[in-house]
């Protein structure tokens, strides 16, 4: 059961990792290939023929990359993890505009330490603290094709989750709630710190439809606590921090199919998410990822 739980919750963009820590001495590694694309931005309720509720950029923006993840069990109740993507972002139509030039590099690098807090009945709890940094792409943060906003942030996360039996098979569900303190890139008289701090919520529900295959649904949401509404002319005054200055929010929902590990075989996952609501952020973000992972060493339960 432990091996199965470790194969869930980490293989999509922001999906809940859940409260279950990695067994002592076990190494959990995976690589995911992903594609994300958008064209339309929510901008103060504006509408357009191309986007409906939103305004289009001149060409769709597409990012492709590989995400590497490593997790290690320090003890029965503690584990650590680090992840990093290497990506290329470009507009689908060639442009001579500096903001639309292709960008290749390292995206947001994230690390965290997590402690399992215990359980109440069937529900488990954990808390984690972490750091994420966009230092590797800070010079290109002002582009439409950026890999992130170039900040360094501190994160605190509280996670809950449970497993159980539903019909002939078991299920797994979890929720993560995170707060990100974002070190300012600049300070504005009207907006305050840029970017504002953020709240993130992610959740998953997975069901083992067969002994080796599961299916699930996921939801990811974030809300920036301060910032400006999107006006392409107005935000230019913030220079390369134009995107960080936005009061951005977004909700994505999606699904996934998983093949559980067996013997020397890795676990596999194909997942997809689509934006269903946004404010000052892309309204049509589509994310697809294929990932595989292994558990090495440690005690398997």
Image: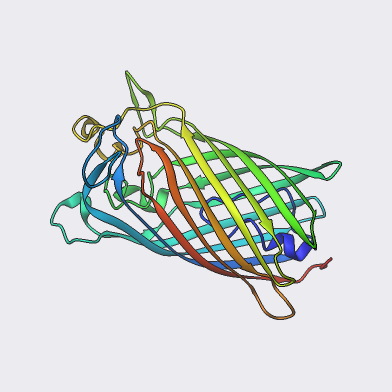
Residue lying at 57% horizontally and 51% vertically, measured from the top left: 218
| Residue 23, percent from left and from top | 79, 60
Given residues 139 and 100, the one toward you in this image is 100
Residue that protrudes farthest toward the front in the picture = 167
Residue lying at 35% horizontally and 48% vertically, measured from the top left: 138
| Residue 74, percent from left and from top | 76, 56
Given residues 125 and 258, the one toward you in this image is 258
- Vertical comparison of 57 with 248: above or below: below
| Residue 38, percent from left and from top | 33, 52
Residue that protrudes farthest toward the top in the picture = 189
- Vertical comparison of 170 with 223: above or below: below
Left or right, 100 with reference to 86: left
Given residues 253 and 154, the one toward you in this image is 253
- Vertical comparison of 248 with 271: above or below: above
Number of numbered labels in the structure image: 0
Residue lying at 68% horizontally and 47% vertically, measured from the top left: 174
Given residues 16 and 204, the one toward you in this image is 204
Residue lying at 70% horizontally and 50% vertically, measured from the top left: 173
Quadrant (top left, top right, bottom left, bottom right) of the N terminus: bottom right
Report whether residue 183 is seen.
yes
Left or right, 275 with reference to 49: right
Quadrant (top left, top right, bottom left, bottom right) of the C terminus: bottom right
Residue that protrudes farthest toward the right in the picture = 121
| Residue 163, percent from left and from top | 78, 52
């Amino acid at each position: 059961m432990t091996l199965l739980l470790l194969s869930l919750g980490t293989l999509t963009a922001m999906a809940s990792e859940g409260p279950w820590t990695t067994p002592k001495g076990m190494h959990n590694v995976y690589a995911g290939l992903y594609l994300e694309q958008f064209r339309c931005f929510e901008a103060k309720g504006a509408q357009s023929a191309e986007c409906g509720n939103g305004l289009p950029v001149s060409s769709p923006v597409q990012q492709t990359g590989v995400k590497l993840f490593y997790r290690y069990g320090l003890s029965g109740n503690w584990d650590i993890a680090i992840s990093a993507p290497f990506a290329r972002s470009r507009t689908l139509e060639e442009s001579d505009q500096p903001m639309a030039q292709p960008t290749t590099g390292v995206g947001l690098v994230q690390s965290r330490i997590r402690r399992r807090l215990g359980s109440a009945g069937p529900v488990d709890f954990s808390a984690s603290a972490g750091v994420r940094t966009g230092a590797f792409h800070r010079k290109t943060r002002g582009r439409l094709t950026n890999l992130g906003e170039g900040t360094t942030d501190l994160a605190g996360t509280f996670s809950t989750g449970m497993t159980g039996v539903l019909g002939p098979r078991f299920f797994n569900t979890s929720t993560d709630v995170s707060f990100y303190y974002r070190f300012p890139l600049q300070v504005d008289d009207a907006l305050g710190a840029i970017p504002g701090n953020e709240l993130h919520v992610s959740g998953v529900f997975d069901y083992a439809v067969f002994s080796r295959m599961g299916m699930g649904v996921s939801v990811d949401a974030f809300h920036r606590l301060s910032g400006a509404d999107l006006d392409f002319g107005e935000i230019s005054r913030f220079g390369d921090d134009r995107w960080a200055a936005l009061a951005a929010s977004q909700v994505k929902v999606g699904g996934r199919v998983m093949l559980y590990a067996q013997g020397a075989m890795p676990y596999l996952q194909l997942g997809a998410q689509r934006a269903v609501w946004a404010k000052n952020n892309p309204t049509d973000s589509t994310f697809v990822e294929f990932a595989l992972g292994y558990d090495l060493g440690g005690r398997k339960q």
